[in-house]
Image (spheres, rainbow, N blue to C red):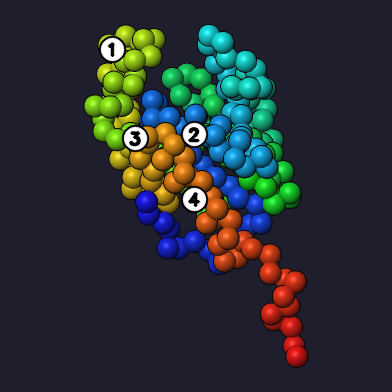
Amino acid sequence: MITNPQMPAILSPGLLVVLSAPSGAGKTTLAHMLKKEFPEAEISVSYTTRSPRGAEANGRDYHFVDPLTFKQMIDRNEFVEWAEVHGNFYGSSKEVIGQSYRARGMALFDIDVQGGTSIKRKYPDAVTIFILPPSMEELERRLRSRGTDSDDVIQRRMLAARAECEKGAQSYDYLVINDRLEEAFLQLRSVLIAERTRRGRVDITGLRLNSPD
């Protein structure tokens, strides 16, 4: 794992965490494990204009909205990041960040590298963590084991995964290889515990260290 040496000295009291990974790396499973470990964490549910798939539920997997509603949210500057992907729009609301900062809590974003990079630009103290598979071969095996995609779809996913892994490895603060789920979770947990105690984030006003004698 690597850290960002340019983290600002004055940090927001809440913790803004971005998890990104290629499809099949276990990102969403790890995000929900973190939610159980840190009850104060609020997982951001993205907005999208695409239709629900399979058992997806509104408000749990995504907030499903029509294009006009999405555009109105853009005009009101309600998204911390948004993008158009294959003709559909996806975006993350700013609301969860404000709530977490006010309560000294944790905002957890389960998004792609493009969205994570956008958040990092706007919130430099955000903690970005990229989840990597142990190998590209293992990632392909996991995708095939789902039994939901054709060979063509899997090949496209693999091409996208390699590009995303390259971007994440170059720009994210921390890298976690998800070979064994429990070990990857412990690494994630350690990162968040350490970030909670980072200088500039801990409230030490009660010590009155800068008060005159």
Secondary structure at numbered mark 4? helix
Marks 1 and 4: in contact by CB < 8 Å?
A: no
Marks 3 and 2: in contact by CB < 8 Å?
A: no
Find residue 62 and report its horizontal and vertical position in percent: 60, 22
Q: Label 2 belongs to which residue?
A: 30
Marks 4 and 3: in contact by CB < 8 Å?
A: no
Secondary structure at numbered mark 3? loop
Compare marks 4 and 1 and give the one earlier in the sequence. 1
Q: Label 4 belongs to which residue?
A: 190
Amino acid at dot 2? Leu
Q: Label 1 belongs to which residue?
A: 152
Compare marks 3 and 4 and give the one earlier in the sequence. 3
Find residue 38 and report its horizontal and vertical position in percent: 62, 42
Compare marks 2 and 3 and give the one earlier in the sequence. 2
Nearer the camera: disc 1 or disc 2: 2
Q: Residue at x 45, y 63 (%)?
A: 6
Q: Residue at x 53, y 24 (%)?
A: 89
Q: Label 3 belongs to which residue?
A: 179
Left or right: residue 38 compared with residue 86:
right
Residue 111 visible within the image: no
Packing grade of label 1 (10 A; few <14, some 14-19, many >=20) is few
Amino acid at dot 1? Asp
